Amino acid sequence: MTTKERAAFSLEGKVAWITGSSTGLGKVMAMQMGAAGAKVALNYNNNEARANATFKEFQDAGYEGIMLRGSAVVEEDVERMNTEITEKLGPVDILVINATPDQPQKSIEDYDWEFYQSMLDFFVKSPFLLCRAVLPHMKKQQWGRIINIGSEVFTRGVPNFTAYCAAKGGQNGFNRSLAGEVASHGITVNMISPGWIPVERHEKDPQEMKDEYLAGVPAGRWGVPKEVADTAVFLASEEASYVAGQNIHVNGAHTIA
């Protein structure tokens, strides 16, 4: 390979910030972006022991980055984390908005507004705070990647999930509008909407619920976290420079069944 060539989907020289990346899909996305050459800021808010174990695994794989503690829905935490990333790794080039709370399914009568507000905080307030923090650098360098992690539940209109669906719909609207706003600055904004891809927090889910879901997936198999992570690496790469404002479903055709 000559000095003018580079590997496809390389993230060499880029700094990526992935919220909620001590476990689940976020952890695998951090690993894959590290493998693609990015310096990665991983983030957690609650479980320090789990975060330390994840970061050790990340470092043992030979990747470069830092682990940050902070809430993606608290303005002061977002600003502090962005400053720390800039000081230790460099300004953020790639932002993956992934942090999520528990998502219990309930009838609308069993929800209260406090829970609705918590969903809006994670999926509307947090993207706003995070993007506002990183966009000045992206605009200055005329290059950036923002990736929202959505969900197929919005497209499918899953029953007994009104709070989560409403908030994810808001995030989808944010994704679409911001994409048009910043495209002229060489910044792409996209969304990945996974189907039900089992990770650690699904270990105790009822088997009958899993069987029912899988029966409706045309691909006839479960997705794996790496398939979501590889999609994120693609969207973060130079190869995806003309992909903007899209909502890519990674779910084995479940939303077109």
Image (tube, rainbow, N blue to C red):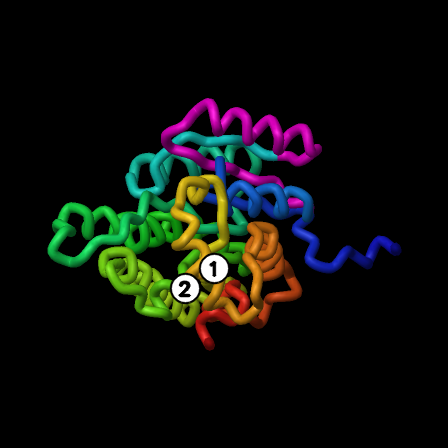
Nearer to me, 20 or 158: 158
Across and down, in percent, residue 6 comes to 78, 56
Kind of element beneath mark 2: helix
Foreground residue among 58 and 165: 165
- Label 1 SS: strand
The image shows residue 98, relative to residue 218, as above or below, that is: above
Marks 1 & 2, CB-CB < 8 Å contact: yes
Q: Is residue 77 left or right of residue 63?
A: left
What stretch of residues is rendered in magenta? 37-64
Look at the picture and state if 54 lies above or below 243.
above
Q: Is residue 42 left or right of residue 233?
A: left
Bin the neighbour count of mark 2 within 10 Å (Cα to Cα): few under 14, some 14-19, many 20 and up: many
Q: Residue furthest front?
A: 208
Vertical position of residue 204 compared to residue 233: above or below = above
| Residue placed under numbered mark 2 in the picture | 152
Tell me the residue at 63%/47% (across/down).
32
- Indicate the amino acid at tag 2: Glu
Q: Is residue 150 visible?
A: yes
Can you give x and y, in whole percent of width and height, for residue 107 in the image? Answer: 18, 57
In the foreground, 43 or 256: 256
Marks 1/2: CA–CA distance: 6 Å
Q: Is residue 245 visible?
A: no
The residue that appears at 55% across and 31% down in the rendered structure is: 54
Q: Is residue 168 magenta?
A: no
Query: Badge 1: few (under 14), some or many (20 or more) residues near its Cα, within 10 Å?
Result: many
- In terms of sequence position, does the residue under pointer 1 or pointer 2 come before the other? 2
What mark, if any, has residue 194 been given in the picture? 1
Which residue appears farthest toward the right when viewing the image?
1
Q: Name the amino acid type tagged 1.
A: Pro
